[in-house]
Image: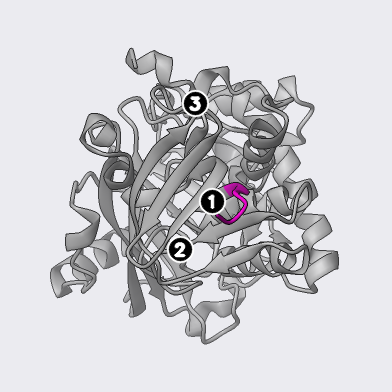
Amino acid sequence: MNKPYDAIVIGLGAMGSAALYQLSLKTSNVLGLEQFSLFHELGSSHGDSRIYRQAIGEGLFYTPLAIRSLEIVKKLERLAHLDLFTRTGAIIMASSPGSSVLNGSSDFIGEAIRSARAHSIYIEALDLAGIRNLSSQFNLLGEEVGYYEHGAGFLRPENCIKAQLSQALLNGAQIHSEEKVINIELKSKNVVNVKTDSQEYTAKKVIVCGGPWIGKILGSNYENLFQVDRQVLYWFDVEDSFSNFSLGRFPVFLLFRDSHLFYGFPAIDGRHGGMKIATEVDDPIDPNMIDRSVTDKEIKEISEQVKHIFPALHSPVCLKTKACLYTKTPDKHFIIDYHPEMPNVIIASPCSGRGFKHSLAIGQVLAEMTIEGRTKFDISHFSLKRFNI
């Protein structure tokens, strides 16, 4: 019988690639399994860009993960010679005081400002005049409040994943793509059996990073912990007003308006690449049944909203769209914990939509939990016990 792997990582998106890379720094006897081809666009880790910020409105306990993630990114940029992070600054604002409700936070902006002060993150609290001074591109309604985070920017998700997987391979890790996990079971006290649609493996530890498919991998007892939503990303033509939205002139942004969150980026790929803008919707689906086409109605609705937010885009033209999947827990916070019935299995759901900025550090957390049995980071807020499991 073959010697068990020290660890198997299931799913190689944002979370799984980070976990495999961090594990490979500790042991080469690790395997990564991906049900699709590598760098696919079927889950939650594609779309050219992800906002990176350290002042976290969802809770102060996230900020150490965001800070550590950037440290890892800077090291990976040197190792892999890839463009991973660009600093642009970030403006986060709400159309009126008290209207920044998101991801379980009733005061996202206030919590983010408290997080920044607690962790010495350079931000400026903004009133309406301050927002106008910084962001002439926006159509403001007259009661906006917010803040500007100087060190924020965006990550290139595809490059981050590519960098981590390539470094893991250089460190001796194995990767098997297009291999779907069918079952996980505890074979003995110290060995877990992983069955795929083509092979069976054994490992001392298993980390489940299945993203939108994590509920299906864990089974019916846990599937109700994960809601998967279809989300759409849009890129709008800014060629005629490129100077307003170019890198160096326009920051990444979050805007709370009319009970919606809008977020976006400068034109990161030049005059013809468009400006990416998206919102968040509650649209539960089965991840295997997602409709990846985007309707004319959806494009028209977001175009009307974009027209009202950015006066320079009075006739917005959508260049392209991409559908992706968000995964949410009932309280909108992450799950990072040992499986209640199989202590050699670790469950990791970084919660799509805001997980990428933390994912590189969570990879380190998972590697520490796997090899040392504990982590130096405080992950008590991500325990399954809060769901009485």
Q: Quadrant of the C terminus?
A: top left
Decide which of 254, 65 is in the foreground and name it: 65
Secondary structure under tag 3 reads loop
* Residue 4 is covered by the magenta coloring: yes
Q: Which residues are magenta?
A: 1-7
Question: How packed is label 2: few (under 14 Cα within 10 Å), some, or many (20 or more)?
Answer: many
Is residue 137 something one can see in this rendering? Answer: no
Residue type marked 3: Pro
Query: Which label sits on residue 343?
Result: 3
Q: Residue at x 48, y 71 (%)?
A: 275
Q: Mark 2 = which residue?
A: 34
Q: Which residue is mark 1?
A: 9
**Element class at badge 1:** strand
Contact (Cβ within 8 Å) of mark 2 with mark 1: no
- Asked whether disc 2 touches disc 3, contact meaning CB atoms under 8 Å apart, the reply is no
Q: Residues within 10 Å of mark 1 (few under 14, many from 20)?
A: many
Furthest-front residue in view?
Answer: 1
Amino acid, disc 1: Val
Tell me where residue 66 sits by quadrant.
Answer: top right
Q: Is residue 348 magenta?
A: no
Vertical comparison of 159 with 127: above or below: below
Q: Is 375 in front, or is 42?
A: 375
Query: Which amino acid is tagged 2?
Result: Glu
Q: Relative to the observer, which residue lies in front, 365 or 85?
A: 365
Pick whichever of labels 2 and 1 is earlier in the sequence: 1
Mark 2, secondary structure of its residue? loop
**In this image, 87 relative to 297: left or right?**
right
